[in-house]
Image (spheres, rainbow, N blue to C red):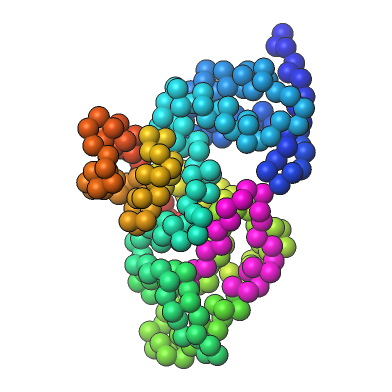
C-alpha cells in the first residue's frame, strides 16, 4: 500500500497560502515533456525538502534544477512562465514577442503604431492585419507574479478600440474589414474582467485564458518559445539579443549568426544552438487567432 504523503501548505507569489497540489505539479511537468520517473523523483524531492508555507518560487526552483540535469529541452519548456516574465523590464520585448506570434500565424504586425480615432489619436502596442481582419492589440506586461488584470484594464482598452474602429469604418467602409480589439497579458485576468470582455466582444489572451487556448497553450503547441527559455544563455546575453529584436528561439535556429553577433563562439555556440533547436523542433500550425 502506497504511503500517504503529508499535507503541505505553500505560499503563492501573491502572498496567499494554499494546499500544495501534487497533481498541478505533475501536469505542468508532464506538459513540459518530463519522463514519468523524473516527475516522481521531483515530487519525492519536494516532499523531502518541504517546510511550513514553502514558497511556490522555491518549489519551482527545485523542480527546474532537477529537470535541467535530466534534459535542458524539458527544463526550457518548464520555465516558460518565468521566461515570459523575463521579457522586460520595460515590457517592449513582450510586445515584440506577441507581434512575432501574430506574424507566425500569418499576420503582418507593426509595433508602436499611432492610429487615428474618431475623437483622438492613440498609440497602439501592435496593429496586425491578415486578409480582411484588422487587430488592434494592447499588451499589458507585469514583471511581478501574482499581479492580475482587473476590469479597469479591458474597460480602458475597449473604449480606445471603439474610437479607432469608428474612424476605420468611416474611412474603409467599402473594404468590408473585420475589426478586432485585443488585450494580451502575461498574467491572469480577474473573473469580472473576462465577463466584461466576453459581453463587449473584446478578445483576450492571458497565461491561462481562454481555457486550453491561453498563452501557455499557444506556445507549447506551436513551439514558438522565447529566447528567455534558454538555460545556456546568461541573463545579459538574453538582454543583448532582445535589444536586437531577437525574441524567438526559432530566430536563432534560422540565423545562428545572431549568437556570434553577441560574442558567443566556439563550443558554447553549438551548445546554445542545439538547445534552441530542440526547444522549437515540434513547431505545428495552430489556429489560435
Up/down of 126 relative to 39, above or below: below
Give the image location of residue 205, x and y in percent. Answer: 55, 58
Look at the image and say whether residue 144 sits in the magenta stretch.
Answer: yes
Where residue 239 sits in the image (x, y, percent)?
A: 40, 49
Residue 132: image x %, image y %?
38, 75
Quarter residue 74 falls in: top left
Picture layout, residue 91 above or below residue 10: below
- Image quarter in which the N terminus is found: top right
Q: Residue at x 44, y 57 (%)?
A: 93
In the image, taking residue 282 as reference, residue 178 lies left or right, namely right
Q: Is 86 or 6 nearer to us in this picture? A: 86
Relative to the observer, which residue lies in front, 81 or 211? 81
Q: Could you tell whether 107 is left or right of 90 in the image?
A: left
In this view, the residue farthest toward the top is: 1
153 part of magenta stretch: yes
Q: Residue at x 55, y 84 (%)?
A: 163
Magenta region, residue range: 136-157
Residue at 49 percent across and 48 percent down: it is 86
Amino acid at each position: 500500500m502506497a504511503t500517504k504523503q503529508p499535507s503541505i501548505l505553500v505560499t503563492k507569489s501573491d502572498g496567499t497560502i494554499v494546499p500544495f497540489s501534487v497533481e498541478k505539479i505533475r501536469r505542468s511537468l508532464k506538459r513540459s515533456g518530463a519522463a514519468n520517473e523524473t516527475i516522481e523523483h521531483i515530487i519525492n524531492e519536494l516532499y523531502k525538502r518541504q517546510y511550513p508555507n514553502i514558497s511556490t518560487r522555491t518549489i519551482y526552483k527545485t523542480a527546474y534544477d532537477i529537470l535541467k540535469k535530466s534534459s535542458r529541452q524539458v527544463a526550457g519548456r518548464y520555465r516558460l512562465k518565468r521566461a515570459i516574465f523575463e521579457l522586460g523590464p520595460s515590457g517592449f520585448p513582450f510586445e515584440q514577442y506577441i507581434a512575432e506570434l501574430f506574424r507566425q500565424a500569418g499576420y503582418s504586425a507593426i509595433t508602436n503604431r499611432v492610429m487615428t480615432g474618431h475623437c483622438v489619436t492613440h498609440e497602439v502596442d501592435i496593429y496586425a492585419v491578415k486578409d480582411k481582419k484588422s487587430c488592434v492589440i494592447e499588451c499589458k506586461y507585469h514583471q511581478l507574479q501574482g499581479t492580475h488584470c482587473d476590469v479597469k484594464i479591458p474597460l480602458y482598452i475597449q473604449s480606445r478600440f471603439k474610437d479607432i474602429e469608428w474612424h476605420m469604418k468611416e474611412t474603409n467602409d467599402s473594404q468590408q474589414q473585420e475589426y478586432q480589439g485585443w488585450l494580451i497579458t502575461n498574467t491572469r485576468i480577474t473573473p469580472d474582467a473576462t465577463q466584461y470582455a466576453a459581453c463587449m466582444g473584446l478578445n483576450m489572451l492571458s497565461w491561462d485564458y481562454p481555457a486550453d487556448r491561453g498563452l501557455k497553450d499557444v506556445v507549447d503547441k506551436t513551439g514558438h518559445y522565447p529566447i528567455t527559455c534558454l538555460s545556456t544563455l546568461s541573463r545579459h546575453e538574453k538582454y543583448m539579443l532582445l535589444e536586437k529584436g531577437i525574441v524567438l528561439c526559432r530566430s536563432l535556429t534560422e540565423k545562428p549568426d545572431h549568437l556570434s553577433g553577441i560574442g558567443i563562439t566556439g563550443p558554447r555556440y553549438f551548445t546554445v544552438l542545439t538547445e534552441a533547436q530542440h526547444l522549437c523542433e515540434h513547431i505545428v500550425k495552430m489556429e489560435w487567432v
